[in-house]
């Protein structure tokens, strides 16, 4: 989003921009994840697994992808009103966990910390992930499958994203304009339900 790069667009310089899907791109090719749809799919899974009041913890940052995650939560909570969305900083995780547990939340999607740190914060608050609170985190790390319990993850598939970038570059060099929506993947493990996957 550097201004001198954006200023070059009217002069025919091919430009690929990475934004959340649905956000107007400033370049010829826009690519990004549909973060809102990814979070809706995650909340759908938690509800299917029996969650009655899920919580979503997001970083308190001004970024289009954080706003898109929040928009997905807002959309989902319009249909299923019992739920909580909180923004904060990573060092506020223990207090935020205490807050949502105090509101009887029984499931958590956390974008503030990795799986191990989030599980630790839940245990410090007196609840067991996978038993008392269902848990999903954003992560592409295979180590999450080895934790106790194995943690469900929303994955943004970095290899597919890299392929998407190269495809976007090839398209813009051919003179094309379009939006490319990159895939996401939900790996369901013991922390949120029976082991399975959802694309």
Image: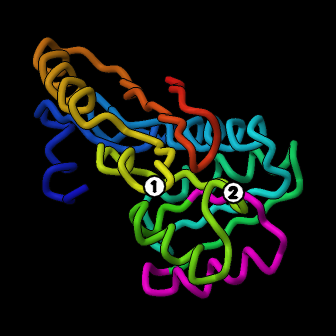
> Disc 1 or 2, which lies upstream in sequence?
1
30 up-or-down from 73: above or below: above
Residue picked out by circle 1 = 64
Q: Is residue 176 left or right of residue 76?
A: left
Quadrant in which the N terminus is drawn: bottom left
Compute the Cα span from label 1 to label 2.
33 Å
Q: Residue at x 80, y 60 (%)?
A: 83
Q: Residue at x 58, y 76 (%)?
A: 123
Q: Position of residue 43 (x, y in %)?
A: 69, 44
Q: Which mark is residue 131?
A: 2
- Nearest the camera: 58 or 29? 58
Disc 2, SS = loop
User: Can residue 96 be found in the magenta stretch?
Assistant: yes
Q: Position of residue 120 (x, y in %)?
A: 48, 74
Q: Position of residue 34 (x, y in %)?
A: 49, 36
8 up-or-down from 175: above or below: below
Q: Which residues are magenta?
A: 89-109
User: Can residue 194 be found in the magenta stretch?
Assistant: no
What scheme was used to colour the molecule? rainbow
Disc 1, SS = helix
95 up-or-down from 127: above or below: below
Q: Residue at x 84, y 70 (%)?
A: 104
Q: Indicate the quadrant where residue 87 lies.
A: bottom right
Q: Is residue 36 left or right of residue 118?
A: right
Q: Residue at x 77, y 35 (%)?
A: 48
């Amino acid at each position: 989003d550097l201004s001198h790069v954006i200023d070059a667009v009217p002069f025919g310089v091919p430009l690929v921009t990475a934004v959340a899907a649905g956000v107007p791109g400033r370049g010829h090719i826009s690519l990004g994840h549909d973060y809102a749809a990814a979070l809706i799919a995650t909340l759908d899974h938690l509800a299917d697994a029996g969650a009655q009041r899920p919580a979503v913890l997001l970083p308190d940052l001004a970024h289009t992808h954080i706003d898109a995650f929040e928009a997905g939560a807002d959309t989902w909570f319009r249909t299923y009103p019992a739920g909580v969305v909180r923004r904060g900083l990573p060092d506020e995780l223990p207090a935020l966990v205490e807050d949502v547990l105090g509101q009887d939340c029984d499931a958590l999607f956390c974008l503030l910390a990795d799986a191990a740190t989030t599980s630790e914060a839940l245990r410090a608050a007196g609840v067991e992930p996978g038993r008392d609170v269902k848990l999903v985190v954003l992560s592409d790390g295979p180590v999450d499958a080895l934790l106790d319990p194995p943690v469900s993850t929303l994955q943004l598939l970095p290899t597919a994203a890299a392929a998407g970038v190269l495809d976007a570059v090839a398209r813009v060099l051919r003179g094309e304009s379009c939006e490319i929506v990159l895939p996401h993947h939900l790996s369901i493990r013991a922390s949120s339900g029976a082991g399975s996957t959802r694309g």
